[in-house]
Image (cartoon, helix red, strand yellow):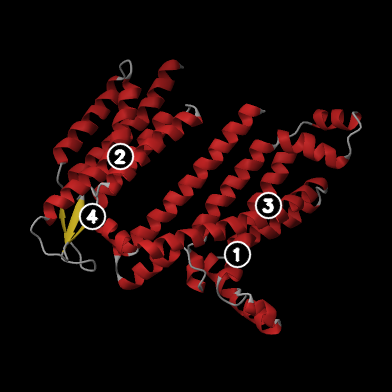
Amino acid sequence: MSETRTRGEALPILVLSTTALLAAAFLPMVHVAPNRLLAGVPTSPHTAWLFAAWGVAIVCGAVRFRGHGVVVASIGWLAVAGLPWLAGMSADTILDGAARTTRVQLASGFWVTWLAAALLLLDRLRGTRVVVQAGAWGAALAVVVALTATGAFDGLALVREWQAQRAPFAQAVVVHVRLAAITLVLAVLTGGPLGWWVWRRRRADGIVVGLLAFLQTVPSLALFALLIGPFAWLARAWPTLGALGFGGTGAAPAVFALWLYALLPVVRYTVAGLGAVPEDARDAARGLGMSRLQVLWRVQLPLGWPVLLAGLRIVAVQTIGLAVVAALIGAGGLGRFVFLGIGQGAIDMVLLGTLGIIVLALTVDLAFQVVLALTERRA
């Protein structure tokens, strides 16, 4: 049993380290392009350093000596924080004496290697306390932020794009967070009571959940488009709504569509959380003279809190991703950079919006994990 477990622990190390090694060997790390629109020439500097690091990781996975996990985790952490630094150094070297329009774009080798390193670090941190995980990722982020402040990445095309779009990008982040936050609040205020009602009336489970599941099958782009007409009609029928910014395009139909998508996980996890409380606990609470609402607030919600919070975590991350499409109907957000970049053929603008969405989703996910760990500890 222990040998099987050990082999299972070593497999992710070998697979991810080998993937990173092959990516460093056969995929380009950066592209050198004459400007932001044209394709670049692939190149792979600092390959020897990457070969050495991933070779050590492969040896650790194969030999599994004492403390090999710490070594592998350290390599993963150094790669997560150090690969951007190596790319920045490469960009500075390439741009020395080059034309001002020259762009150094991050290529597939960088992204595959960095993703393998991130997954390796995630695997090594699995099972540790949330505080340790948050500290490791927070330290890596702090290193990247500090290097950004020193100008270590100024030569990269992605950073140049961000510097040129800094104010619109910050505004887009605020709008994106606002859309997700409003959707989450509305989903909790409506989906929570609806889930409680479904849990109380078991016969309604199939009808309500089936209807919400059907809404999930509607493509997001189609749903956003279908809402333009009804919301435009409402704005014309009630001019007061139009004066408040309520119309066929903008935040109103976007939030409504995101709310429809968020209802299913909220209702499902509410039903699961309330159902996870043992019947004996509810009977004991009623035996103490508690009313139905008192049982809900004092027994079911505290005991079902981990399941409920897991549902909110899924809703938050899902909403951040779906809010990208809201940019197509004028709601703004980080999706604006994605679609503008696609229209202009500017891959760096697409990456800027995409990475912003990924970082935002990971930050929210980590925040929910920290909240769950802290509340469970207090309980």
Asked whether residue 230 is in view, the answer is no
Residue 61 percent location from the top left of the image:
30, 25
Query: Extreme front residue here?
Result: 150
Q: Visible in this render: residue 343? A: yes
Residue that badge 4 annotates: 156
- Disc 3 to disc 4, C-alpha distance: 41 Å
Disc on the earlier residue, 3 or 1: 3
Q: Is residue 89 above or below residue 240?
A: above
Determine whether, in the image, residue 27 is placed left or right of residue 205.
left
Residue 99 point in image, percent of width and height: 11, 64
Type of amino acid under label 3? Val
Pointer 3 local density, CA inside 10 Å: few below 14, some 14–19, many at least 20: many
Alpha carbon separation for disc pair 3 and 1: 14 Å
Q: Determine which residue is flagged by label 3.
A: 188
The residue under label 1 is 255
Mark 1 residue element = helix
Residue at left offset 60%, top offset 75% = 245
- Front-lying residue, 86 or 29: 86
**SS of the residue at dot 3?**
helix
Closer to the N terminus: mark 2 or mark 1?
A: 2
- Secondary structure under badge 4? loop
Measured in 3D between alpha carbons, the distance from the residue under mark 4 to the one under mark 1, in whole angstroms, is 35 Å
Say which amino acid is labelled 4. Leu
For disc 2, the marked residue is 81
Disc on the earlier residue, 2 or 4: 2
**Which quadrant of the structure image shows residue 290?**
top right
| Amino acid residing under circle 2 | Ala
Q: Residue at x 33, y 45 (%)?
A: 145
